[in-house]
């Protein structure tokens, strides 16, 4: 604990106890000291003392929204999300104009992965599991059931409907999902009948005391798009060896994995540098910039990507039997590694490999299976293994590959993109998307070139300081280029290749403006990135805009962007709706929707550019974004082109005016490639608009946007 912070905390508490007439005057400083002191307590994991501090704060200021937001934030940091949600809800209820509370609530709800909603809305998937569970209980007498990773409790509910079931044990490691399952089981009157027991653990942590006897049937659906990413192999191996009777069964029974080669420039855009202009201006020598690999594969709904094409044959390359210890062990230990060949069916660029699977639920019913192939429209997306560069194939060319799942990680090995003389430098995918947006960079450079006089310093906080680096190379910056510290390693390499002195760079933490303030430096050109990676507004940059203005050398200097406007269109999209909330009629009957939809979100980010939807209006301007932390509100009434379909979302995008002299607003979303993403506000319920005009209510506060529709 920081002694100075403790002293400051005790001092202000004592002052307010002695003179409560100063409460309002001291509120801002009190909140600042409260946050700082509790942050120091957090380092020592002293949650009880943090709660005592907030009890004092609430005693002074009551249910103040700002205090509740800070309290909820600490609950979330200590993984007490259920309580945090209630606190954020109370904060927003107390002050509907405080959109920080709304933002915190949305962020917390989004910790429940959106695939939970898509899966619960996938009636075909659910019915396949229901049939298999029903068969083994009713026809084969598997009466003791273990549901691993129960989530909302759906598979346990299916088991409970079987007359011959005796006991169901459901395990779930996530405390929030466990809380949801508890309420679902209670509403379905299962726990009062002692028919089901819910345990907040991983199944691999189960001890003998947790169950009376071994199980006859294990049911589980812990597969990601690459099958093994959620630990299904080691989970089922542990269950087979420790939890199941010798004759016990696992549902699902078996998985078959398929592979094809694909072509998609869109999927390359965040993995490979495609912009030839960059290579003309900035010398890379024998380096290639590629996207960093934090995961063994990406996950994509490839049917939502317009330029995605399969350009080889498709092979079933791997089969794992979950009811065979031998099969699972051989795959987990890497004993089984399948060599296979794909054949190109055209002269085209190969960009990587797409993987999907068939899940066979019941060995006694071979027709009961789930396919996740791109055309199946299942809740699963596909696993994408990207190459490090585009490889031009000839028709009928043979590709040699090896697939394995050693240690429960799906992997494809090949030498297709190996070049001994090439050095690869991994960068964040956002950098590559930004550098591949040639049209945006061209317009940004044009705007920056408006400043004709001598430049001493530049602050470039773009996803990559492209303009700042160009100006350095052209010797236009007499002082320094200030930029984010995350680019330091790459910029030093590029500097050495382009004859730029490393001393010309100043690397900073872009979220900490005190580094600039303390240096007492001013800039002739400042370039900000007011957008988050997934498409929405960066509220912190928005609120700090006026501070950045103070860093300009004089009023003739440039701060980019000068203006941002929000545009939208009302749409009907079943896919968006089913990705954000439970809509299935069966889930309503089972009372799952009631509790899962407490975690439905309004904001849907990073929307595929080719997502299908029905337009209900043309594009319309909603409002200009205010660069401050104040409250703003406006109503807009767009004309309805279609009143026959319900409105369930508003699709959003920004237009940007780079400088005051720029006469037009540049659209960030274009028919050509864009590094920026659309996003949407999905309404909590479908809205049928019978009038010629809809009414859109726009609110902005602390750089956070909220939209409602009537």
Image: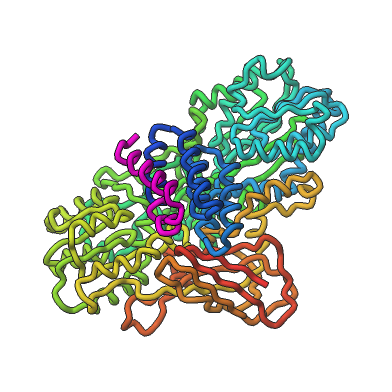
Determine whether 670 is above or below 269 in the image: below
Q: Quadrant of residue 525?
A: bottom left
Quarter the C terminus occupies: bottom right
* Magenta stretch in the rendered image: 1-30
Residue name at image x 65 percent, y 14 percent: 208
Q: Is residue 609 left or right of residue 543?
A: right
Tell me if residue 359 can be seen: yes
Q: Is residue 220 left or right of residue 132?
A: left
Spot the residue most to the front. Answer: 18
Task: Report x, y in % for residue 396.
Answer: 48, 51
Q: Quadrant of residue 674?
A: bottom left
Looking at this view, is 115 or 421 the one in front?
115
Tell me if residue 347 can be seen: no
Looking at this view, is 480 or 189 the one in front?
189
Residue name at image x 33 percent, y 81 percent: 660
Q: Is residue 53 left or right of residue 506?
A: right
Q: Is residue 133 magenta?
A: no
Looking at this view, is 5 or 24 the one in front?
24
Residue name at image x 70 percent, y 18 percent: 211
Task: Report x, y in % for residue 381.
Answer: 58, 49
Q: Quadrant of residue 276?
A: bottom left
The image's colouring method is: rainbow
Looking at this view, is 324 or 147 the one in front?
147
Task: Report x, y in % for residue 222.
Answer: 62, 36
Q: Is residue 555 left or right of residue 107?
A: left
Q: Main secondary structure of the magenta part?
A: helix
Quarter the N terminus occupies: top left
Q: Is residue 22 magenta?
A: yes
Determine whether 250 is above or below 691 in the image: above
Residue name at image x 41 percent, y 40 percent: 414
Task: Report x, y in % for residue 289.
Answer: 31, 52
């Amino acid at each position: 604990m920081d002694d100075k912070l403790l002293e400051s905390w005790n001092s202000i508490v004592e002052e307010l106890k002695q003179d409560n007439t100063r409460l309002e005057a001291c509120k801002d400083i009190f909140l600042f000291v409260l946050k700082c002191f509790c942050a120091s307590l957090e380092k020592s994991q002293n949650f009880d003392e943090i709660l005592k501090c907030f009890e004092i704060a609430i005693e002074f200021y009551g249910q103040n929204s700002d205090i509740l937001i800070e309290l909820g934030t600490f609950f979330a940091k200590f993984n007490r999300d259920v309580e945090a949600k209630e606190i954020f809800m109370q904060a927003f209820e107390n002050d509907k104009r405080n959109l920080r509370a709304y933002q915190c609530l949305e962020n917390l709800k989004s910790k429940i992965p959106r695939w939970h909603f898509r899966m619960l809305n996938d009636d075909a998937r659910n019915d396949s599991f229901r049939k298999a569970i029903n068969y083994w209980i009713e026809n084969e007498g598997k009466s003791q059931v273990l549901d691993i990773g129960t989530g909302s409790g759906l598979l346990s509910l299916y088991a409970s409907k079987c007359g011959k079931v005796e006991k169901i044990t459901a395990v779930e490691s996530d405390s929030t999902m466990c809380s949801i399952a508890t309420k679902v089981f209670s509403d379905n009157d299962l726990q009062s009948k002692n028919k089901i027991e819910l345990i907040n653990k991983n199944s691999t942590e189960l001890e003998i005391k947790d169950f009376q006897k071994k199980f006859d049937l294990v049911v589980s659906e812990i597969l990601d798009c690459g099958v093994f990413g959620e630990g299904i192999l080691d989970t089922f191996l542990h269950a087979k060896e420790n939890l199941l009777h010798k004759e016990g069964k696992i549902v699902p029974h078996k998985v078959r994995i398929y592979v094809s080669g694909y072509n998609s420039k869109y999927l390359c855009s965040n993995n490979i540098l495609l912009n030839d202009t960059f290579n003309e201006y900035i010398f890379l020598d024998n380096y290639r910039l590629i996207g960093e690999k934090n995961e063994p594969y990406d996950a994509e709904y490839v049917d939502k990507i317009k330029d995605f094409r399969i350009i080889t044959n498709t092979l079933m390359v791997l089969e794992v039997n979950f009811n065979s210890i031998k099969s699972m062990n051989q795959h987990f230990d890497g004993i089984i590694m399948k060599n296979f060949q794909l054949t190109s069916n055209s002269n085209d660029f190969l960009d990587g490999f797409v993987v999907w699977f068939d899940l066979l639920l019941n060995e006694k019913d071979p027709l009961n299976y789930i396919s996740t192939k791109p055309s199946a429209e299942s809740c699963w997306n596909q696993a994408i293994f990207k190459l490090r560069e585009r490889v031009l194939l000839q028709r009928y060319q043979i590709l040699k590959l090896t697939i394995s799942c050693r240690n429960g990680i799906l992997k494809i090995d090949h030498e297709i993109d190996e070049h001994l003389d090439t050095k690869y430098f991994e960068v964040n995918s956002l950098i590559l998307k930004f550098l591949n947006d040639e049209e945006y960079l061209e317009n940004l450079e044009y705007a920056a070139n408006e400043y004709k006089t001598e430049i001493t310093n530049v602050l470039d906080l773009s996803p990559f300081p492209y303009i700042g680096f160009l100006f350095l190379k052209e010797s236009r910056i007499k002082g320094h280029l200030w930029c984010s510290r995350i680019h330091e390693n790459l910029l030093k390499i590029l500097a050495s290749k382009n004859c730029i002195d490393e001393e010309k760079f100043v690397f900073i933490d872009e979220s900490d403006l005190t580094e600039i303030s303390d240096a007492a430096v001013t800039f002739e050109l400042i370039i900000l990135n007011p957008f988050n990676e997934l498409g929405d507004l960066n509220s912190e940059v928005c609120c700090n805009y006026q501070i950045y203005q103070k860093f300009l050398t004089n009023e003739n200097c440039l701060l980019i962007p000068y203006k941002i406007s929000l545009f939208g269109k009302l749409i009907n999209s079943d896919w968006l709706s089913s990705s954000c909330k439970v809509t299935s009629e069966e889930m309503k009957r089972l009372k799952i929707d009631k509790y899962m939809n407490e975690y439905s979100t309004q904001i849907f980010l990073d929307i595929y550019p080719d997502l299908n939807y029905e337009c209900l209006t043309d594009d319309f301007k909603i409002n200009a974004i205010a660069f401050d932390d104040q409250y703003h509100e406006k109503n807009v009434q767009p004309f309805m082109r279609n009143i026959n379909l319900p409105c369930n979302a508003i699709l959003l995008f920004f237009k940007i005016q780079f400088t005051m002299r720029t006469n037009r607003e540049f659209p960030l979303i274009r028919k050509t490639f864009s590094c920026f993403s659309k996003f949407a506000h999905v309404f909590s319920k479908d809205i049928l608009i019978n009038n010629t005009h809809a009414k859109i209510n726009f609110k902005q506060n602390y750089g956070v946007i909220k939209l409602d529709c009537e």
